[in-house]
Every structure is written in C-alpha cells, then in structure tokens.
Image: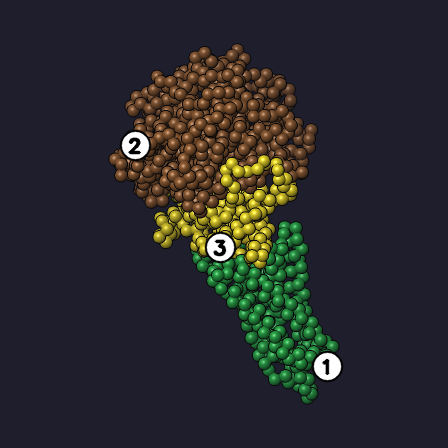
Amino acid sequence: MAKLKSNEPSGPVSEKWEKHKFDMKLVNPANKRKLKIIVVGTGLAGASASASLGELGYNVHTFTYHESARRAHSIAAQGGINAAKNYCNDGDSVQRLFFDTVKGGDFRAREANVHRLAENSVKIIDHCVAQGVPFAREYGGLLDNRSFGGAQVSRTFYAKGQTGQQLLLGAYQAMMKEVEAKTVTLHTRAEMMDLVVVDGKARGIIVRNLLTGELEKHAADAVVLATGGYGNVFYLSTNAMACNVTSTWRAHKKGAYFANPCYTQIHPTCIPVKGDYQSKLTLMSESLRNDGRVWVPNAVGDHRPAKDIPEDERDYYLERKYPSFGNLVPRDLASRNAKEQTDLGKGINGGLAVYLDFADSIKRLGKDTIEARYGNLFDMYQQITGTNPYESPMMIYPAVHYTMGGLWVDYNLESTIPGLHVLGEANFSDHGANRLGASALMQGLSDGYFIIPNTIGHYFGSNDLGKVTTDAPEFDEALNNVQEKINQLVNIKGSKTVDHFHRELGLLVWDKCGMARDKAGLEEALKRIPEIRDEFWDNVNVTGDGQFNQTLEKAGRVADFLEFGELMCQDALHREESCGGHFRTEHQTKEGEALRNDDDFCFVSGWEYNEGKKAKLNTEDLTFKDVPLSQRSYK
Amino acid sequence: MLKLSTIQKKQIVGITGLAMVGFVLAHLSGNFLIYKGPEAFNGYAKFLHDLGALLWMMRAGILASFLLHMGFTINLVITNRKARVNRYYKYQNHRSESSLATQLMPLSGSIILIYIIFHLLDFSLADKVGIIQGIDYGLYGLVINTLKDPIHAVLYIISMASVGLHMYHAFQSVFQTFGLMSEKNQPRLVLASKVLGVAITLGYSSIPVYIMMNF
Amino acid sequence: MAEDKTITLTLKVWRQKNAEDKGHFEIYKAKDINENMSFLEMLDVINDTLTLNNQTPIAFDHDCREGICGSCGAMVNGVAHGPVSGVTLCQLHMRSFNDGDTVVIEPFRAKSLPVIQDLVIDRTAFDRIIAKGGYISVKTGSAPEANDTPIEKKKADASFDAAACIGCSACVAACPNASASLFVSAKVSHLVLLPQGHAEKKRVVQMVDQMDKEGFGGCSNAYQCQAACPKEIKVENIARMNREYIKEKSIR
C-alpha cells in the first residue's frame, strides 16, 4: 500500500490556487500549436476543456461516441449551478460555499480542491453569461437565484429546469467555434476503446469509428478524459442510456487508480420503476420537496387509494424524524428513509414507492401558484405515468443519479498515469462522499474552463516529451487487444441479450450495493458478479457484424461494467464506515444515522488494477484544517 | 442568381409579389369603372394609353416583377424539391386551414399564369372592338361581350378565386419573409390576408356576375 | 391499482442496411405492449425478440430518454415524434395508441440528413451550421462581471425560449422543403436577443449561407416546423432571422 500525494501547493487554503497559478510552468504560444491533446467526451467538462485549450492554441482532438457533441448527458441537468456571488446579500461567500461543499461531502473530499472550486464558481457565471447562457433574470434585468438542498443561502443560478442544457450548449458552441478555427478537430461517433501508454506516459487512445466499425490509433502529447460517471452499472439510473465506465475503466486497467468507487448518489425524487420493460429512470427536480410532503400509510398492507387514507393514518416520516429540516433533509437521508419505509412494507401497495403530496400546498397557495412553480414538472410526471399529480399525490422513489467516485487525480487533475488528466464526474475530486445539488455543473466547468488550461501547460512545461507516433508497438498491441475482444463478442452468439446481463448486474448491485450495504450482501455480490460475467462471455448474443452495430457498442460497455461492479463492491466492503452516499448498516447511530469512522477511514481509496487478482489499495490521507471534522446533523 | 441565399430569393419573390398586389388593386379599381358605363371605362383606358412612355415604364415594371417573381419561385421550388428528395410513405399535414392555401400555391400560381396569357390575348392584344346591339363600345363592349359567355365567365371567376387564394397565403407570408411577423401580430396579419384574398376575389368576380345578369 | 392495460400493434418499420441500401418496410407484430411503456421501450421489446431470433435489431438513436438530448426521433404515422405534440419520441407513451393500430415508423428524411441505418440519420450538417457562427466569441477568462449588463426580462425569456432547441431535426423532417430555418433561426434568435450576442452581425449571414450550402431547402412559410417542434419553438424566430438578415445585408 502506497500513499498518494495530492501535489497541492503549500500555504493557506485560500491562497493555494493563486500561488499555484504563478508557480506553474508555461508553454510558449508558438509551441502550443505543436502540442497535441486528446480530449475524450464532450459534456460540460470535455467541451469546455476543448474550447479553452483550443483558444490557447493547442492542437486539440476531441472524441465523442455521440453523433453530435451537444448530446452529452450534462444536457439533462435540471436544477442549476452554484456560485458564491452573494447577489442575494444573504451572507454567502467563497468561504461558505467551500464550507458547505466539504460538509455536504461528509468530510471525504480534498479541502484544497474544494476551495479552488468555490473560487472558480464566480468566474464560471461571468463567463457563461458572456457566452449567452440565458439564465433566469429578475424583472430588473439582473440574475435571479434560488435556494437548493444542503445550503442556507440562495446561490443557485438556473435557466428554468434546463440549466444543464443551456450550459452545455454554451460550451458546445464555444468548442464548435474552435472547430471552425481548426484548433479543435472533432471526431463524432468515435468511441474510445483503450488508452495507450508509452514509456509510462499517456500518449494516445484506440478509437472505434462507430459508423464503419474500424479501429483507429490516435497519438498525442497528453490525454484528457471527461467521460462522466458510472451510474449505469445499476442498469436503471437517471443517466442516459449510453453513459458508461469504459474509458475510465480501460484507463484504470492501464494503471490509473480508481478512487472511491463506492460513493454513489441516490436521488430521492424519481419516478418509480413501473415494469420489467423499464429502460431508465426519470428524475423529478429536488425543488419539489419545497412544497410537497412525503408520506406512506401507517399500516403495513394498507392498499387503499391515497384519498381514502385519512390524515391520522398517514406517516409523514421525514417530518416526524427530522422536525427542523422536515421534507428538506439532504438527498442521502431522504433516499435512505424512503428505503426504510418500503423495507418495512409500508410502500404504496407494498411496493417501491412513497407519496409526494401537494394537496396541502394546493389548498394553502392555490393551484395556480403550484402550477407556476412546478407546472413543467407536473406535466412531465403526467406524461410518463398517465396520472394527474394535481389530483392524486405523486409517487416517487430514489434512483441512482450521480457517482462521486472516479479516477484518482492530484491537484493538477492528473491521474496516476502521467499525462492522463481526468475532469468532471469522471474524476473523484471535489464532492467527497456526497454531492450537493447544483454542484456537478459547477465542477465540470471549473475543471474544463479554468483548471486544465493552466495545469496541462504545467505538465508540458515540466516534462520532456519525446515524439511518439502511432507506429509505436504499444498502439498495435492495444489495438489488437480491442479487436480480439470485439471478435470474441460477435462470435459468442449465445441465447441471451446484452440487456439481460446488464439488468441482472444492475439488480444485484442495486440490492447489495445501493442505498444501504452490509458485509454479507457485498460478499454475496462479489461472488455473483464473476458468475454473471462468465455467463455473459459464454452466452451473450451480439447480432450483426463488426460495422455500425448498436448492440455491439452496448455489449462492450456492459462487459466493462461487469468488471467494474466488482471493484465498486470491493471498495464498499472495505470502507467499514458510513459516510454520505455510502451507508453500511453495521455503522449507524442509535437513531439510524450514518456513522463515520474518522480514525480509520479519513482517506481516499485509490484502487490499483492487479491483473487477474484483487485490486490493490493505495490511500491519500485527508486532513481538515479549515472545516473541522464534525458529525452532520439535520434533526 | 446562384450567389443569392434562399432568404434573398424569397425576399425578391415577396417584394415583386407585393408590387403585383398593388397592380391587382389598381387594376380592380379601374375595372370598377365598368359600373359607371362605357364613357368612364373607355375614358380611363384612353387616359392610361395617353400616358405614353410612362405607361410603358409601368408595363415594364409589372412585367419585370412578374418575371422575377416567377423566375425566383421556380428556382426556389427546384431547390426545395431537391432538399426534400426523400418523400415519406405517410405524411400528415399539421395546420389544415392556412396550410391549404400554402399547399395550393403552385396550383394557384399556375392557374394565374395561364389566366394571364388568355387575359392578354382576350383584351390587351385584341382589337378593341365590342359591338353591342350594333354599336361599337370599344373596350367596354369587348369586356361585356367576352364575359357574357358563361364558360368565359366561370373560368374568369375560377382564376380570380386563384388570385384570392394566392393572396391569402402570400400577403401574410410577405410579412414573415421580411421579418415583420411576430406571435402577437400574426393572427391580425392572417386575418388581413384573408380579407384581402376574399375582397379581391369578390371584387373581380362581381363584374362577370353583373354582366351576365344585365346583358 | 388496476392491472396495466396491454395492446397489440402492427408495426411497419423502415429497414435500411446502410446509406447505399434502397431500404424497405418490414412488418412486425408488437404483442401485449404495456400501455405505460414509452415508445422507445416498445422498440426495445421488439429488438429483444429480434435478437433472440438472431435477426438484426432496429437501429435508432436515443440517449437521455427524457426529451432533452435531441438524439431520438422518427416519423410515426407521418408525424415527427408521433401524435402527441410538444414531446419527443422518447416521451411518447403507448397509451397514445389503440389496440389493433397499425403504426408506420420512418426515419426523419431530407437530402441533408441521410439515413445511416434504419432510423438512424446523419445530422452533422447541424453542427457545421453552428460552427459558422452559432456562438458568442468570448475567450475564457475575459468576461466582465455577470451583473454588469442587465437584460430586459422579456428579452431574456424570449432568448431562453429560442435556446430551448434540442437540435433533433424534427423541423427539417416535417418541412415540405426540408428547410432548416427553424433550427437556424432559433440559434440566431437566442444569441441576437442578448446584448452580449448583438455585436457579431455576420452570424446570421454565415449560418444561413451554410444552411443553403448543406442543401436544405428555403422557407415557404408553411409553418409545419412549428407544429412538429417538441420544444414548441415558434416561427416568429424565422421572422427575426429574416429581419436580422436584411439588416445585415442592407447596412453593409
């Protein structure tokens, strides 16, 4: 077990980034053109990085498996983006955003990174407004803010329920401008299949052209991964259908450490699963909890329709257990409590759903007010479920939403493979064990617009990079491995679909490594996953050939999830504590709250791939100087 | 022609179309003189004729508008057909009412073209002789005698209905093409367009009806 | 809770191996479809059956399945994104169909949106149009304080409404001329309505020129696009684009 070094600069936390920016090495503008950077992914982090690196004059090659860069799943973020502007004069500051994020993350994030994120938040808003992001405005023409879970100030900027869309389009457009200027070369329908490491440094990738099926070799001086999270390991999640772990997993197998894979965020307000056919889950914005009351029937087996259950036979369990925060407890608590109720058999019709009831609010504020606040969400709910939430309460249930874990990176966002930088949800860096609402967009853009343009120059300035072309034997070796795997997949011609295995894996990890985990369950999952994997490689049916083939694309991604799932469970089993999104039932207070173990687990787990054997653990110790360690309480 | 964008071509179609709307209205007001009798009607024709060079300039203007309107329309139709080379097995049109006029633009336009040819042969290029009960009433008589024929009259009315239909789409469309349409004023412009189309159809059609009833 | 209703449909689906293939319709029976399924989930079920019979599944683009990424889309019974207005194909649910219905599924068609396979089309033309000016040129780090420039709320809202475009190309698919005017004008409107985007006057001309170059048709003001748009983008934006175009061309 080795200790990982964060490489953060010395000095007070609030001065680190400024100091570091001055200390870092620079690249001469004339030389930037000669340096080629590969960026994988075109979500907020990837598109903003591509745009900014292109502006600086680097030779950027950007890859996405989508048909257009604008389709990345950042586009679906609804709520908003935090920034410490203090426009509301309610006492917000960089310091407070920093504090809230560290605390919200249950003290499992790196302080220096979080502070830098809070500093950058302010510049992100300036930049996005200048780019033409149509944020919501007040009548006077200035920017509007709203409040969000986990904070006592209003610091969330938003564009209706489509903030992610507008921010992504801003970054996408900025990138397309660079495409036109020929500093960025965009490769669409191109999926990264492997990372190529030459002389210990990341020097290229193997890409599958999804249209022709051809494998391509691309060499570069540095590689940036911005490929999102791994929430789809659970099969059902709010992630888009194609979201996958392949790029980060392949990088992991080439030597990048995977950090904290057990930190997954379960969002409390999603539309419940309806049937076996269900392909994905839909999030209903967290803002609904401002006016909706969560309840279940008092009695197990009470299957009467909601309107027939009298007031005194209802259990408003969040209000009962957390009188001061009520329905507005943080995401992890709201989710876990819903599970607790349904585990008791008190779910609606005994199933996996609880009510989110607006009847009181409609009575108090009138239907018009509720419609003005949540009209689009209510419409969406009705579209999907076919029931009218103005008349009968919504049914909701938690669903996998975001993954805090990811490839381990140092302060420069560089992984344990020199030259491989990781941005956005794909890295582990800023959210600790639980992410606060409206912070994902902030992190993606901070990484892409403001951090990587600085730190990648430092990498170039401090390393003597020899010339590497795709003729290097490492490229052929990687390409052949990928080709072999593809050949294998299309030749199995078994009797089960790819989705069958994905669903089986998803159900298993949801059950054993979802909202609550325990030793026995995790051990069982660790036994089952290799079995499912073996059956997959024995009996999956990938129809068609090696050309444009959506089944084959899916199969490759599921194959990687089947390996990754094991690491996730291993990490969950190893972390003998409860923190944020990781709740081990063995570690809870008498009241059933998460119980951290700061003495033994105040570190980041960085897992090292170990061919054919269990992954090896390396750790980065976390120290909390500016936000003292404390137990969260929302009673 | 190649250097112009589709928007510019459409704008040329629009502006020339608008010029022709002016012509159609002026022509209609002239036609109404038929109700005042042969002196007024023929007098107006003579007045126009006596304008000499000015009349020729006006004619040239109208002809140019007409040719540009048609030329660019045909050019755009070719472009649009090429863009929509792949047709659907099943296609449902969305807006029933206004889109009918829109869909029928090529048909109404073609009818108008054929009509204009016959109209020129019937009146403008014909000898201005119109004998009614043994007396030559000149152009006035020619108009009466021509439109007295029910087949002629019906074809004339169909043609005028085509003009009206063409206007119904075209007039509001011009506002859109020149960027003057907004969500707010759209219903009013569509209504104005409808009124104009109907008024032009009724105005012109009233003449053959009047002639058939009185001669 | 009552049992979910199921329906049985006859699907007539466009199958096309690749861009060169002529393509043809294939008939499939969709049996016992739960009416709470989304349209794409119904296709998933068909594809599962096809796979298990060693046939090639129907290819279709899709990703977020919540109506925002713009990946999905097909003509369903001759209507872009199907019979419910204001939603994308992934948000269409099977309760919008009746037992026994025949459903014709075709790809979005246009010369500039060639079919890649089955219902998958190539929309890269849209990206090339955006690259010609669908942005505000601001270098990272050079932006002034965000609240320095107030923006009239009405304009900011109108800008947002135009910016809601998801680039799905239903407008092109529904247009008798296969024009991309609604798409292009939505971007022009989004940016020109903001003071930040006002300075770049050539945007509209460059984007329109690129649209023409890509082989999209011109606008004949038939407004089919507005009816087809899942985000309910208005043709008012096309008027604004035309206006900006004249302004730029006549002032130069």
Check if mark 1 and mark 2 are on a common chain: no
Choose between B119 and C15: the one closer to the eye: B119
- Residue A148: image location, x then y, percent: 58, 28
- Residue C208: image location, x then y, percent: 51, 53
Is the N terminus of chain A in the top left, top right, bottom left or bottom right quadrant?
Answer: top left
Which SS class for mark 1?
A: helix
Q: Residue at the right extreme?
A: B36
Contact check, label 1 and label 2, Cβ < 8 Å: no
User: Does residue A374 lie above or below A113 as drawn?
Assistant: below
**Color encoding of the figure:** by chain
Choose between A164 and C202: the one closer to the eye: C202
Mark drawn on residue A591: none
Please, which chain is the residue tagged with disc 3 on?
C
Report the residue at 56% width, 63% height from top: B12
At label 2, the amino acid type is Val
How far is mark 1 from mark 2, CA to CA?
Answer: 100 Å
**Residue at label 1?**
B39
- Asked whether residue C97 appears in the rendered view, the answer is no
Check if mark 3 and mark 2 are on a common chain: no
Which chain is assigned green?
B
